[in-house]
Amino acid sequence: MTLLLIPGFMADAALWDAMADDLAPFGPLVATDLSRGEDIESMAAAILSDAPDRFVAVGFSMGGYVARELARIAPDRVAALILIATSARGDTEELIRQRRSALKAAPEAFKGLSRPAIVSSLHPDLAGDEAMIARVRDMGLRLGGEVFHRQSAMARAGDLDRLGEIHQPTLIVAADVDRLRGMDEAEELHRGIAGSTLVHVADSGHMIPLEQPEVLAKVMTDWLKTLSRWERVRVLFMRLDPALGHQSARGVGLLQLHAPVVEHVQRDGGARDGADHMVAALDDLELGRAVDHLGLDPRSGRRVHAAQASNPAFSSASLRSRPMKTARLQRRSLSPQGC
C-alpha cells in the first residue's frame, strides 16, 4: 500500500529519511510537502491532485490537519490515517500573532527558522545538538521564504467537531515531551475518531520522525501489518461487489455489510484474530457468490453451463457447508501491496 508522507510546518521530505528503509517493505513511499496552498483545504486539494489512486495518509503536525482533510474529501482513496504529533484544535490568537510577527521581513530575507523556535520543538536534551538543529533549519531553507510567509499567515481552524466524519482506520502517535502538542490533544483525537489507536513515544519532543525514527517506524510498521490484513478484506469486498467495497472504504462496519459473513465468523470461531476470520469468511462467501452469480465450477474456477450452475450441489449454501480445502476458487494473490 502506498504511504503518502505529509510533513509539517516548514518541513520537507527529509523529515522521513531515517525511516525510509523500515517503511519501504509496506509499499511505495510518496513524500510530499505543504508548499502549495493558502490553507488546509487548498493544501489537501493540491496534494490530492498528484496522489496515487489509494494510499495511507501519514501526516506529521500540520500535515495531520491535511491528512484528515484528505480523508474527508476523498474517503474512497484514503485507506487509513497515521497522525503524528498533531492536534484537532484551532490556532490560538497568541499563536497566530507570534507567527505573523515574523512576517515583517521580506521573503527574500528568510534565513531559516530561529534557534529558539527549533529548540522548542525538540526534547530538552537536544537543545545543544547542533546537527539536529541544522537538520530542522535546513528543511525550512530548502522550502524558502515564500512558503514560510504562506504557512505563517495561515490561521488553522480546528476540526474537533468533525472528527466523527473520519471512518478510516487511524493510528495516533504522540510524544511524551512534546512542548508544542500536548498529550491531551492526542487524547482528543483518540476520543473523536472511533476505533483509533493511540501510541505514546517516550523520550521525544515534537519532531518524532527526526528524534526517534526507529521507534516511530516500529510503531507504524506493527500497526500497518494489521492494516494489511484488513485491506485484504476490503479487496475481497470489492471483488464480491464494488458497492460493498466502497462502503467498507468509507468505514461502514465490515461485520454489518453481509449477513453470511457474520454467520461464518460466528460458526468458525477459533484462535485466529478478527481480520483472519474475515478473510476466511469472505473467501468462502466469494466462492459461493461466484458460483451463484457467475456460474463458475468451484474446483476449476471456470464457467459451467447454466443448467449445471443451477444444480443445488453447486449452490453457495452447499459449498459453505463443505470443507474449505475442497471448495476453493483459484484466485489472485492478495499481497500487502494491494492498496
Image: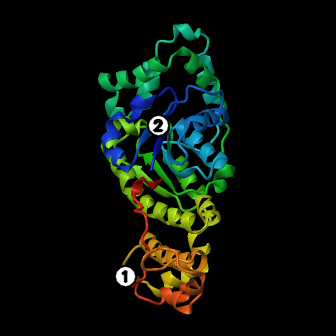
Q: Percent position (x, y) of residue 53?
A: 55, 46
Residue depth check, mark 2 versus mark 1: number of the one nearer the observer: 1
Tell me if I can see residue 119 in this picture.
yes
Under mark 2, the amino acid is: Arg
Q: Which residue is mark 2?
A: 179
What colour scheme does the image use?
rainbow
Label 2 vs label 1: CA separation?
56 Å
- CB within 8 Å, label 2 to label 1: no
Question: Quick one: 82 or 175, which is closer to the camera?
Answer: 82
Q: Percent position (x, y) of residue 330?
A: 42, 71
Q: Which residue is mark 1?
A: 325
Left or right of 283 in this view: 215: left
Left or right of 257 in this view: 144: left
Say few, some or many: other residues with alpha carbon within 10 Å of mark 1 (under 14 / 14 to 19 / 20 or more): few
| Image mark for residue 113 | none
Q: Percent position (x, y) of residue 156?
A: 65, 34
Tell me if I can see residue 212 in this picture.
no
From this view, report whether residue 300 is shown above or below residue 41: below
In primary-sequence order, the first of circles 2 and 1 is: 2
Q: Tell me the SS state at disc 1.
A: helix
Q: Percent position (x, y) of residue 104?
A: 61, 11
Under mark 1, the amino acid is: Lys
Q: Tell me the SS state at disc 2.
A: loop
Say few, some or many: other residues with alpha carbon within 10 Å of mark 2 (under 14 / 14 to 19 / 20 or more): some
